[in-house]
Image (cartoon, grey):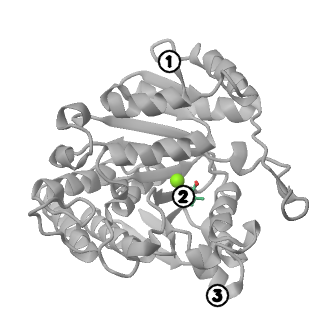
Amino acid sequence: MLLNLTILPGDGIGPEVTEQAVLVLQAIADAFGHQLQLQRKSIGGAALAAVNDPLPADTIQACLSTSAVLLGAVGSPAFDHYPNHLRPEAGLLRLRRELGAYANLRPAICFPALEDCSPLRADLVRGTDIMIVRELLGGLYFGEPRSITGSAGSRIALNTMTYDEPAIERIARIAFDLAVKRRQKVLSVDKANVLECSRLWREVVIRCAKDYPGVQLAHMYVDSAAMSLVQRPKDFDVVLTENMFGDILSDQAGGVVGSLGLLASASIGGPVGLYEPVHGSAPDIAGKGIANPLGAILSAGLLLRHSFHLEREAACIENAVSAVLNQGSRTADLARAGQNPVSTSEMGRRVVEAVKQSSALA
Ligand code: IPM
Ligand code: MG
């Protein structure tokens, strides 16, 4: 199969971690007889620095002309003072919209080897396997109007949270479809005691649930969900929620399973899927060779699964990651006292090795 991809390394640790993910994809292509074809394009601060646009037209064109996009991270403090539409993040948000990627899947899994990386007790976190389904094109991120107006000292900031029924319904269906293949549980997270958006959200989700009689639907307010996520993470299966709540809860889930550096994501629903680690650009550690590439590598696995339906290949990446963790490989974010951390590229090399070994056995 031809795996034609656009690679968007982006900012901060983005280039370092995507490089390792690409090496792993190449190993998979070699092992399973696929052909990898890559175009590299710029986004975020890297694109702002080059052409003063966080999402240049040729980047969008490249993304739309390939079958999937692998992105590192966007965001750089150098652009903090720029107006909103000229921030690196604006490039990512526009890309999500251009690709119609309304469904953001963020699995948070506790790898057995990492039970004691979690700040929670091992017996609480053991077996955690959560799929966060975050609505990605609505809510406060995209709502209009938005502005800061008025004069210094009395300025007013405005953002708008808006959701319509079709937008809620399509993301709810993604969550229910996933639950059917998992443990048959959907937890819909909202703030229906305060927000109209959440009241409508809950109504529509309840209506969709009628088409999935085997799936058990529960609702929780977001504040309470945040608490339960640390008290009993393994009770969570599919978590369905709107854009901003999903942004927050997914970082929290990363903390629960030991490191945000492990979390991968798939943004799907449109013609071309977008895959990126959840961690962001981490400018404080960029260029030091210590970032954890596993979130990016696991994102490459999601890319194979969701954009190419290559389940065996995706599972091979996930098994290879488990194997290197079982062997004791730890990047700095995962290393505990007495454990020698490995570099970004060494971690990547070990995953490539594990891919080669497991495919040689198959
Ligand atoms: C994420 C990030 C982005 C978001 C930022 C970089 C715009 O935090 O993917 O979770 O808020 O969606
Ligand atoms: Mg985030």
Answer with left or right where residue 305 lies relative to residue 68: left
Q: Position of residue 259 (x, y in %)?
A: 32, 53
Is residue 4 visible from the viewing direction of this image? yes
Answer with left or right where residue 198 lies relative to residue 172: right
Q: Secondary structure at mark 2?
A: strand
Q: Position of residue 362 (x, y in %)?
A: 15, 54
Q: Which label belongs to residue 206?
A: none
Q: Which residue is mark 3?
A: 50
Quarter of the image where one finds residue 341: bottom left
Q: Position of residue 2 (x, y in %)?
A: 44, 66
Q: Which residue is mark 1?
A: 218
Q: Which residue is mark 2?
A: 274
Q: CA distance from mark 2 to mark 3?
A: 23 Å
Q: Secondary structure at mark 3?
A: helix
Q: Secondary structure at mark 1?
A: strand
Q: Of the residues under marks 1 and 3, which one precedes in the sequence?
A: 3
Q: Amino acid at mark 1?
A: Ala
Q: Of the residues under marks 2 and 3, which one precedes in the sequence?
A: 3
Residue at horizontal 78%, vertical 48%?
A: 159
Q: Is residue 24 above or below residue 146?
A: below
Q: Of the residues under marks 1 and 2, which one precedes in the sequence?
A: 1
Q: Is residue 50 above or below residue 82?
A: below
